[in-house]
Amino acid sequence: MAEQIEELTIRAAGPGDAAAIATVHVRSWQEAYAGIVAGDYLASLDAADWTQRWEQHLRDAEDDEIRTWIAQDGTRTLGFASLGPSRDEDAARGDLEVYSIYLEPGAWGHGVAREIMRTLINEAGEQTTLTLWVLAANERARHFYRRHGFQPDGVERYERVGGEELLEVRFRRG
């Protein structure tokens, strides 16, 4: 999809962006998690269902401390990310968590994720501790996070995805 990126813009997302975010979310999951998450589950993901979830999330986020950004090239949505207060039991006051960062698969390798991550880090501030959870088997994502100063901190959990228990690893920066 994004062989050439002419002008990347990253801006705050709103409820009107829900369909575009949902489409990227589904396509990214289907590509990134192939071979990690059950194929029948990935095939069943529906952008229309996710659009409703994202509309609600983005409306609720207007009252929360959760912020979502969208990356675009003109009117093409290439990716998104969400950041908010850490949900971990051992989080200190002020710690933030990257809830999501997903890209249209055609945008992978074009610097879009790097710019989104820079936006998150700038928004949080260099001194703020950031955490995120990543599937242990997702080597591509783990490598990306390490390049941006995140390291596994030894905390793991199992998350039920597509009917399977999958191991997640927490990464920490700061």
Image (tube, helix red, strand yellow):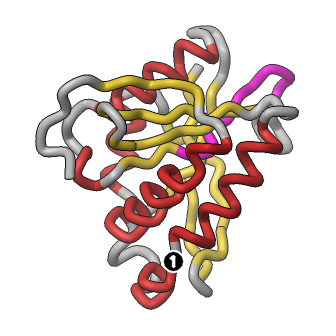
Q: Residue at x 34, y 52 (%)?
A: 104
Q: Residue at x 83, y 26 (%)?
A: 92
The x, y position of residue 31, in whole percent, is: 32, 66
Quadrant of the image occupied by residue 69: top right
- The front one of 103 and 151 is 103
Q: Residue at x 60, y 15 (%)?
A: 123
- The front one of 136 and 118 is 118
Q: Amino acid at mark 1?
A: Leu
- The front one of 149 and 61 is 61
Toward the left, the furthest residue is: 3
Quadrant of the image occupied by residue 68: top right
Residue 163 belongs to magenta span: no
* Residue, disc 1: 45
Magenta residues span 92-100
Label 1 neighbour load within 10 Å: few <14, some 14-19, many 20+: some
Q: Is residue 7 above or below residue 154?
A: above
The x, y position of residue 37, in whole percent, is: 45, 77
Q: Left of 52 or right of it: where is 91?
A: right
Q: Is residue 40 above or below residue 115?
A: below
